[in-house]
Amino acid sequence: MAPTDTTVRQPSHTRARLPRELHPVAWWIWAIGLAASAAMTMNPWVLLMIVAVAALVVEYRRSDAPWAISFSFYLWFGLIIVVIRVVFRIIFGGSMGTDDLVLFSLPEIPLPEVARGIQLLGDVTLGAILSGLYDGMRLAAIIICVGAANSLANPRQLLASIPPALYEVGTAIVVALSVFPQLADSVKRVRKARRLRGEPAKGVRGIQRIVVPVLEDALERSLVLAASMDSRGYGRAGSVAKKDRWITGAIMIAALIALAVGSYAFLDATAPSQLSWPMMILGLLLAAWGMRAAGKRVKRTRYRPIAWQSGEFIAVLSGVTVAVVMKLVASQHLDAVYPSLTGWPELVPILLVIPFIGVIPAFATPPALRDEDTLEVE
Amino acid sequence: MTIVELNHISFWYEDGSEPVLRDVNVQFHEGEVVLVSGRTGSGKSTLLGMFNGLVPHFSGGTLLGDVRLDQKSIIGTPPRELADYVGFVPQDPLASFVGSTVEEELAYGMEQLGLDPQTMRRRVEETLDLLGIAPLRRRALRTLSGGQQQRVAIGAVLTTHPRLLVLDEPTSALDPIAAEEVLATISRLAQDLALTVVVAEHRMERVVPFVDRIVVVDRGRVRIGEPSEILLDAPVAPPIVELGRLAHWHPLPLSVRDARKHARDFELPSRHKPQTENSGAPDISLSAKGISVTYGSKIAVNNVDLDLFRGEVLALMGRNGCGKSSLMWALQGTGKRHSGLVDVSGQDPMNVTADEARMLVGLVPQTAADLLYLETVRDECAAADEQAGALAGTARSILDRLAPGIDPAQHPRDLSEGQRLSLVLAIVLTAEPDIILLDEPTRGLDYPAKRALAQIVKDLASREHTIMLSTHDVEFVAQVADRVVVMADGEIVSLGPKATVLAESPAFAPQVSKILGLSWLTVDEVRDALALGVSDE
C-alpha cells in the first residue's frame, strides 16, 4: 500500500532505533580510524583488542547481504599473514641483538658468498619470532579492519555516493559488478555444453571452445544492456553551455598540472620545498572545484539516498577518536607501544582501553536490516 | 488521439541491400493494444525499435520517412531523450537489468530523468502495487522467476510514466501460467492508464484476445487492421483462427468463448480413437530409476522414475525452474546426479566417457549456441564429423535434411534461431545417438519454423530415434508428442498419452480441445477428419 498520510509524524523520542542501513562512508571512516590506530602500535594486546572490537561491531551490525558474510574470510586471511611472517622469521632467522634468547637450533644451510648476510635456518631466537609475530599481527589487524568495513558497508551504495562528475565511471563499475556473476554462469554453462560435442580438444582449440561462445554471449549481453540503458535515459544531455564546458576543462587541466608539480616536489628532495605542499593543496582544491563544475552537467537524482544522521556521526566520531587518542597516548608510552622482544610485552591499561571507543557503533548505531525484517509481516 | 505515426518509412541496414521495411504508414491511438506479428526476420524488431529511436541510432542503417510521437518528429532524437515518453522492454529482461534489486531497478529510469526523491518514492510504491510485485521489493533480480522478471522489467519502464509501452516478445520464455499473468497485466495497464501498448509476439494464441488491432509485417510491407479482418489471411495465425478459417466461421472467432458459440453448430464426424499399436510391449530405449539432482540444499529433481520407448516423442512440461533441464542433463550423463540409475542398452551414460555418452544420448541444450565456436557453418560441420568419427559430409547431409539451403560460408551467429537450432541438432545427430533430448527447442520459433521442427521430430521418431523435449508450448506438444510428462517441484505429477495429460489441466489444454472438446487436439486432426468425413459420404 502506498502511504496515504501526507503528514509524517516524527516520534518525539525513540526508545529503540529502527533498523536501517548506515551510510557506507561512515563505516569506512570508522574502519580507517581503527586501522590507523592499529598501524601505530606493535603491542599484541592492543592489536588483539582492536581485532576484537572490529569483530564485535561486525557481529552486531552486519546485514544478511552477500558481502556481509566475508568477514570470517578476512579473519582467516589475518591468521595466515601472522603464520607466514613467523615462519619466514624461522627460515631466514638471524639474531635481533646480543641479549637475544636462543630458543632452539636448526641445522644452518650454508649459502654461497653472493648471499652473504642472509642466514637460512640456524639458531631460532625469541626476538626473531616475536618481531615476526608482532609485525604480522599489526598487518593482520589493519587488514581485518578493512574487512570489517567491507562487510558492513554496502558496496553499491558506496559507489552511488561518489561525486556526480565521476558518475559514468561509477556506472561502469556497478554494471561490471552485476555482469560478473553472469559471466561466471556463462563459463559454467559452456564448459558443460562442451561435453556434448566430444572430448575437449587440447591446447588452443580447447580454450577456443570455451572462450568464443562466452565472449560472444558477453558481447550480446552488453549490447542488450547498452540498448536498455540508452532507452531508459542513461546519458541524457544536461543543459550546459559550451563556455562552461571549456572552463571546467581548463580547471581540471590546471589541477592536474598543480598535482603533478606538487608530487614531484614532494618526492624529489632537491626540488624547492615550497613547491610541494602548497602545490599539492592548490591542486586538490582546483580538482574539487572542477569536479563540482563537471558534476553540474549530470542532471540525475538518487532514489532513497541514505541520509547522514546521528548514527553516522557516532560511527565516524568513534573511529576518528580511537585514532586521535591512540596517537596522543602512544607518544607517552613508547616502550609499551613498541614492546621489547626479550620477554612478555608490557600491559598498559590505558592503551587497552582506547580501542574500546571503537565499539560504540555496535550499540549506538541503528541495527542493520536482516532477512526477518524484510519478510512481509501481514 | 494519435500517439505514434509512421509516415512513409523505409529502412535499410546496409546500402544497396534489400530494405527491411518499405513505405510503412501506420498510426497508433491512445489506449490501444497493438500486436505486431510476422515471421522471424520479417522486420518486427526493426519496427519496434523505431518508436524510441533505437533504430537507427543504436542499430545503424538508413531511415527514410518520418516518425512522429505526439505530433512531433523524433527523427534525430536519440533513445535516451525519449525515455520519459516511450517505455521499451527488451526480449530478455535479465540481460537488460541495470540494478541488482527490484526497487533499484524500478527507480533507475527516474534517477536518469532527475525526478525529485518524493516523486520517485511515490511512483515506486505505486508501480509495485500496480504490477503486484510489492513482496519482491528487496529481492535480487537474479533470484526471480521468469514471469516475475518480466513484470519487474515492465514496471521499470512504467515509473517514468511513458505514454507508449513497447514490448518485444514479453512471454516467449514463460510457462503458460506466467504468460497469462504478464498479458493480463499488460491489458490492465492499457485500460487503467490509457497507455498505448505495442507488443511483438510469436505465440499469437496467447495475445490475440487482448489486442485491439494487429500489424502484420511481411517482407517489409506492413498491414494494419482489426484482428478479425487481418487474421482472415495473415501468414501466421493461432490455432483458433486456423480452425475458424477451416470451418468458415464468420465473423472469425478470436477468443475461445466466441469459438465455442460457433462450435455448437459445427458438425464433426465422430472421432476415431487413434489406433494404439498393440504390437506387444513397447521397446524401452532408456530407463531411469530414482533420479535425484541437488544443488546445495535445493532439490531440483526428486526421485524420478521414467522410461522412454523406442520411436516415441515424449514432451516434458512444467513451470520454469521445476527441474526439467536438470533431469535432461542428468539423463544425458553430463549433468550431475545425486542418486539414481540410467540404463541405455545396458550402459549408464554417466559411467562412460563423454564421447561414448553422446553416442548413447544426444542433448541440445537450451542455449544451443553454446555448442558453436567456429567461424563458418562449413567448419562446424567438418569439426562435428571429425569429433564423431563419422564420414566427411555426414553432418552437412543431416543439416540439409533438417534445414536445406544454408550457405556453408555463413557465420553460425548470423543464422536465424531455427537454422541455428537445426545446425546444433545436426552436430548432435552426427554422433548417431539413439536418444535425443531437446531442451526448449521452440523458444523464439515462429509458426512455420515450429511446423518444420515438428516435421523433423516426427521424422527422427519414425527412424527409431527416441525424442524427449521440454517446452512451454502446448500447441507444439499437441502437434508432435506421443506422451506427456508434467513436472512440478522436481517430481513427476502426471505422465501418460498426450490426449489424457493435456486434457487433465486447463492450463495445458490446447485451444482446439478447449473449443471442440477433449478428443480433439490440433487443427490438423480436424482437417484430416473433415476430409475423411467428406470422402465417406
Image: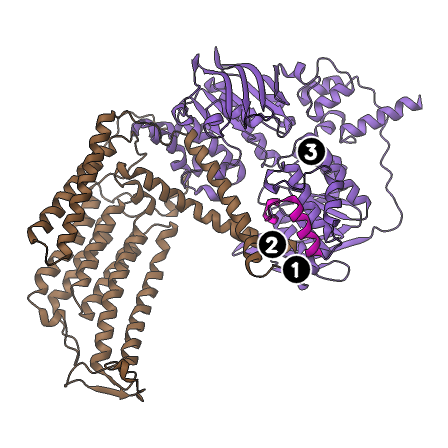
Chain colours: A brown, B purple
* Chain designation of label 1: B
Label 1 and label 3: CA atoms lie apart by 31 Å
Q: Is residue A351 magenta?
A: no
Label 2 and label 1: CA atoms lie apart by 10 Å
Q: Secondary structure at mark 3?
A: helix
Mark 2 vs 1: CB contact within 8 A = no
Q: Is residue B377 magenta?
A: yes
Amino acid type assigned to the residue bearing label 2 in the image:
Arg
Q: Are marks 1 and 3 on the same chain?
A: yes
Residue at the image point whose x is 27% and y is 45% from the top:
A22
Residue B164 point in image, percent of width and height: 47, 21
Q: Which residues are magenta?
A: B368-388
* Chain designation of label 3: B
Residue B220 point in image, percent of width and height: 61, 21
Residue B7 point in image, percent of width and height: 52, 13
* Mark carried by residue A194: 2
Q: Residues within 10 Å of mark 2 (few under 14, many from 20)?
A: many
Q: Which quadrant of the rendered structure holds the N terminus of chain A?
A: top left
Res A159 → quadrant = top left
Mark 3 vs 2: CB contact within 8 A = no
Q: Secondary structure at mark 2?
A: helix
Residue at the image point whose x is 34% and y is 31% from the top:
B111
* Mark carried by residue B354: 1
Amino acid type assigned to the residue bearing label 1 in the image:
Ala
Q: Which residue is mark 3?
A: B449
* Residue at the front extreme, as displayed: B16
Q: Residues within 10 Å of mark 3 (few under 14, many from 20)?
A: some
